Amino acid sequence: MSAMPESQSASQSASPLLTGLKRGLLHRCPNCGDGRLYMRYLKVDPECEACGHELAGYPADDGPAYFTILLVGHLFVAPLLFLPWIWQASPFLVAPLTLIPLAVLTLLLLPRVKGGVIGALWAFRLRKAEDTPL
């Protein structure tokens, strides 16, 4: 039997990528899992309030937006195009019935995808270019 508690050994056996993704999707610090990741909607906290890990150094940039568009486009828009009422109904009815849920889904997914990207960057130890030695 191991001397470590069960929860600690389970977290150490999980790959760092899965750990970082899970913590990022939950809007938590990828390093400790306790501190919050965001100060506001998409504004990353400069450092973790729980462990002091610098969070602002991960270059999420445009990646989360691209991944969100990819997810929403494939999971929402593409299946929508197979529904006959999209092509038969008035555009004045179709536009609000599709664009409003599409906007809400995109706004709900974007912070989670950004957290996942930051968690993946943490797992791969990728930081901003100015942090790398010359």
Image (spheres, grey):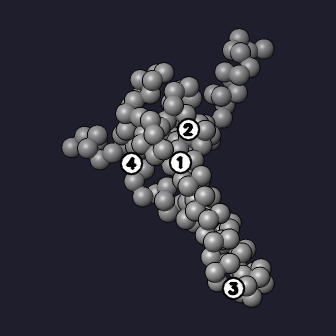
Tell me the CA gap for discs 1 and 3.
Answer: 33 Å
Q: Name the residue under label 1.
A: 111
- What is the distance, in whole Å, between disc 1 and disc 2 at their CAs? 8 Å
The percent coordinates of residue 109 (x first, y second) are 59, 53
Measured in 3D between alpha carbons, the distance from the residue under mark 3 to the one under mark 4, in whole angstroms, is 43 Å
Q: Which amino acid does the dot numbered 4 rest on?
A: Pro
Helix, strand or loop for disc 1: helix
Q: Residue at x 60, y 43 (%)?
A: 25
Of callouts 4 and 2, the N-terminal one: 2
Place of residue 8 in the rendered image (x, y in percent of width and height, measured from the top left) = 66, 21
Circle 2 — which element?
A: loop
Question: Who's the residue at 68% across and 66% down the image?
Answer: 75
In the image, what residue occupies the spot 78% across and 14% down? Answer: 1
Q: Earlier in the sequence, mark 1 or mark 2?
A: 2
- In the rendered view, would you say 96 is above or below 18? below
What percent of the width, then of the height, locates residue 21? 59, 43
**Residue under numbered circle 3:** 90
Identify the residue under disc 4. 59
* Residue to which mark 2 is pinned: 27
The answer to whether the residue labelled 1 contacts the one labelled 2, judged by CB atoms less than 8 Å apart, is yes
Amino acid marked by disc 1: Pro
